[in-house]
Image (cartoon, rainbow, N blue to C red):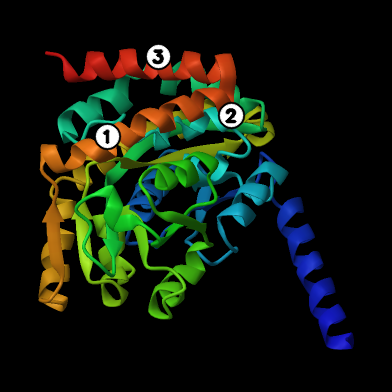
Amino acid sequence: MKVTKAIGMASASLALSVALASAAGAATWRYAFEEALDEVQGKFAQKFKEEVEANSDHTIQLFPYGTLGESADIMEQAQAGILQFVDQSPGFTGSLIPEAQVFFVPYLLPQDQESLNKFFSNSKAINEMFPELYAEQGLELLTMFPEGEVVMTTKEPVKAPGDLNEVKFRVMTNPLLVESYKAFGATPTPLPWGEVYGGLQTNIIQGQENPMFFVESTKMYEVTDYITFTGHNNFTTAVMANKDFYDGLSEEDQKVIEDATDVAFEYILDYQEGLTEEALEKIKEAKPSMTVTRLSEEERQPFMDAADDVEQQFLEMTGDSGKKILDQMKADLEAATSG
């Protein structure tokens, strides 16, 4: 008991000292994200850090996944001002910002990289509407960017929704993602990321979804046998600052952050060119028995039909605000995919 109490006091003391050091004028700014340094969010963070440090007297301290806890922990720390910056998928902010779940409406986002990049660069929904919603939660939305087509990795082949029947499929703690996999026929099972590999290894779950680079880097292929491209989504992430911190900065420092964000955004889009195929080749080399399937348009249709119900559930969850976001996103997507 005494040891536990001492550890608790030491942790509280550390948290307090970190919080006290996190004022807007601090020389060091802290930035946490949900992936490793050599993964997409880590690459973005490193470029952001490089730009900030080259153009100001500030330094950026990076905290990759796991160093400060799970996704929920780093979001709480960002809202509390312990962290100045955080990169987190809208999947994990769905409870805070229900409208952000729009990124989990299946088959809404295009898989064509050029159209996708245009959408994220020019979207009115992302650049004008979402910042207001994030601000209500004490967060300054700096940017959103795609991380790659989401694939399903499973222990059994998936060709149709019926193949997911009774499959316990790991999902993020996101209400709409849960509904998506229910619609697809699976048994959605929310789990913290740290428990996914072990859950697959012990058959507590039989499937999970992520972009291909993440499947390769986290070795999900070691505990699953099938990779299926269903085309249902592209993983999205959001980079945010604590709003009190950001609003307390000088205009000069805000400009440094905005410019660093713009440079890192363009860099990460270029970085991802060919990343999915590169990861796939690494997986095939490491595990030649891995079966990779790309569903045809005809095979995708039953999944797309199920997506109609999920879109309706999104609207029921979010009301008029969600409808405005969805309508604007559809208009933005049409502009990105035409011409």
Q: In this view, does 158 lie to the left or right of 249?
A: left
Question: Which residue, as the protein is rendered here, is positioned at the far right?
Answer: 2
Q: In the rendered image, is residue 167 in sight?
A: yes
Secondary structure under badge 3? Answer: helix
Write down the residue under mark 1. 304
Residue drawn at point x = 62 percent, y = 26 percent: 135
Write down the residue under mark 3. 328
Proximity of marks 3 and 2: CB atoms separated by less than 8 Å: no
The CA distance from mark 1 to mark 3 is 21 Å
Residue drawn at point x = 12 percent, y = 76 percent: 289
Q: Nearer the viewer, residue 219 or 183?
A: 183
* Mark 2 Cα shell of 10 Å, populated few (<14), some (14-19), many (≥20): some
The location of residue 280, given as percent across then percent down, is 15, 61
Give the number of the mark in front: 2 or 1: 1
* Mark 3 Cα shell of 10 Å, populated few (<14), some (14-19), many (≥20): some
Q: Earlier in the sequence, mark 2 or mark 1?
A: 2
The location of residue 5, given as percent across then percent down, is 87, 79
- The image quadrant where one finds the N terminus is bottom right
The CA distance from mark 2 to mark 1 is 30 Å
Q: Which of 133 and 196 is in front in this view?
A: 196
The amino acid pointed to by label 2 is Tyr
Q: In this view, does 35 lie above or below 256?
A: below
Q: Earlier in the sequence, mark 3 or mark 2?
A: 2
The location of residue 68, given as percent across then percent down, is 59, 63
The CA distance from mark 3 to mark 2 is 17 Å
The amino acid pointed to by label 3 is Gln
Write down the residue under mark 2. 134
* Count of labels in the image: 3
Q: Is residue 335 left or right of residue 37?
A: left
Q: Earlier in the sequence, mark 1 or mark 3?
A: 1
Give the number of the mark in front: 3 or 2: 3
Secondary structure under badge 1? Answer: helix
